[in-house]
Image (spheres, rainbow, N blue to C red):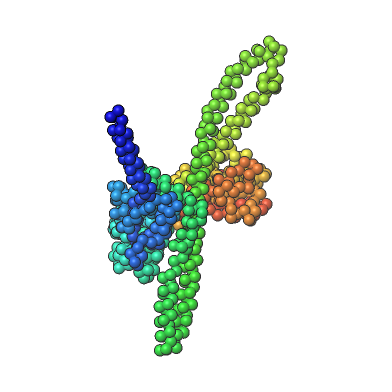
Amino acid sequence: MLLRPFIVLSLLICSSLLGAAERVAIPEASQPRVIHIAADYNYPPYEFLDDEGQPAGYTVELSYAIAEVMGFEIDLTMTDWQSAYAGLMDGTYDALQGIAYSDQRAEQILFSSPHSIVNQSLFARKDGPHVDDIMQVAGYEVIVQNASVMHEYLKRFVPDAKIIPMPTHSAALRLLASGQHDFALTANLPSLYLSQEMGLSNLEPIARPVAGQRLGYGALPENEDILALFSEGLAILKNTGRQQAIYDKWLGTLDQPSRLQWKTLGQYAFYSSLILLFVLGGSVIWNAMLRKEVERRSQQLKAQQEQLIQADKMASLGVLVSGVAHEINNPTGLLRLNLPILQSAWEDALPYLDEANENHQGIMLGGLSYHRLKDEIPYLLNEMQQSTDRIRNIVDDLKDFAREQPDEIWQEVDINQVVETAVRLVDKSIRTATEQFSLQLASSHPIILGNAQRIEQVVINLILNACDALTDSQQALSVHTAISLDSREVYIMIQDQGCGIEAQDLKRLTDPFFTTKREQGGTGLGLSVSAGIVKAHQGYLSFDSSIGHGTTVTVAFPAHRETTTLDSHSS
């Protein structure tokens, strides 16, 4: 009896302690998660410190918007890119908000879907050395941002270049403008922005831009859940249109420096007009020229913005297509594996079925007589096999369409040999389509840098399209190779006398999934894939067609070198 009050008192004390613990834990659990990310402090208009020393830019505002919709907070550190990258690798930062994708980085870092695409350009002084291609900078001194994706690119693909690393884009451009070193390999839009801001009028972009780099969020594998938050938030902002609004705010126009120049020039013209009327006339002419230049630059920036939007759409389409192709490929593989087994089993069962049919004076299978089924089954199996092969071909085309073209140094390719090989592979289709086929190869064997197998794929696709366009075996089909008079370009020309292409369809021929042969089983991926391959080789496709008179397709590649031989091939 004496223990009962003591037991009740103990229970009350324990209950009070548990309640207090729960009251303490609730506020702690309600605190939002804080994610530590880093960014480059000198990469306008994407991420930079403004005049007041505060973080600003497209990716900065995008990160805060994602944190808002996903319910977490970010601790943003603005530093130089080398420190930011090193901090990600040693765990100081959870993620980077504007890291460019590369296959080498993807071995250690996980990437979100891209939020923007940045082209990299080679900048030079107007009075300095110039080259036509990034691969020609071997032996020159090239300034890059330390630890950037272009720093990695030069080390890997142009090891003979003399690399000069600098901490920021502005430092690299100032060093080049001061007369030191030969080139600067930096991001195109930030470099143009900084050149205008710092008044570096003696610099200009040269050569062909390096393939666009996809910027997105990056994190180490152990922070995969953090990357998933940014990916989901980015998708929400895209679907609600908020990302586009942020994009338009920061990347819609970069003509503010030009407006400042207008103000300065206007004041100069006003005071000069008081001194001499001749200066007034000169300033009027100068203002007119400057206005045209501003309009030209604004149109150029608008075109770059539209290209960026289109590239983002195509990247999303490529991801979708790749996933669909993968899902279709698995059941198709099972069909291709099992159909030959079914066909073999049917052939082995025929003697027993024949005997059973004779003994029972006719048997029924699947609601059909045995005699009819014996004739139908081989046809059905063959039709199933052909349909499965067609599914496989469509999946292969989808994979080719979605496949990224890696930046790599290709081997020397003899265009004549590639064309001869392609013609041999489709010889049966050519002979079936026409009796008037000719092949004329350039006597000076044109050489390009590239992937022979991929170029052969383009030639085969174009020849098969030409065969499909022929309606009569007496209509001609010809294939030619040639090199330009200045030896700078190599041409492959496929000409047919087929039905021709409507004028309104010519501009859409290389669009994904556009086809004029839908009823004949066309998928609209052949020319799209071919155009992508040609573009990856720095070339272009052109079409010339007339209804009822045929089509001429010209494939052009930049020439690498020319090997002269004495004989000319034709058949």
Q: Which of 484 and 535 lies nearest the eye of the viewer?
A: 535
- Residue appearing at x 30%, y 65% in the figure: 175
User: Furthest residue to the front?
Assistant: 1
Q: Residue at x 63, y 45 (%)?
A: 517
Determine whether 128 is above or below 372 in the image.
below
Give whichever of 548, 75 is nearer the camera.
75
The image position of residue 405, as x and y in percent, is 45, 47
Residue 324, visible in the rendered structure: yes
Question: Which of these two is toward me, 61 or 413?
Answer: 61
Quarter occupied by the N terminus: top left
User: Residue 176 falls in which quadrant of the image?
Assistant: bottom left
Residue 354 sits in quarter: top right
Residue 427 x/y as whole percent: 57, 39
Q: Is residue 410 visible?
A: no
The percent coordinates of residue 292 (x first, y second) are 49, 73
Q: Is residue 225 left or right of residue 438?
A: left
**Residue placed at 37% from the left, 68% from the top?**
197
User: In this picture, is 3 found above or below 494?
Assistant: above
Q: Quadrant of the C terminus?
A: top right
Residue at 61% in and 51% down: 551
Residue 69, position in %: x, y? 45, 52
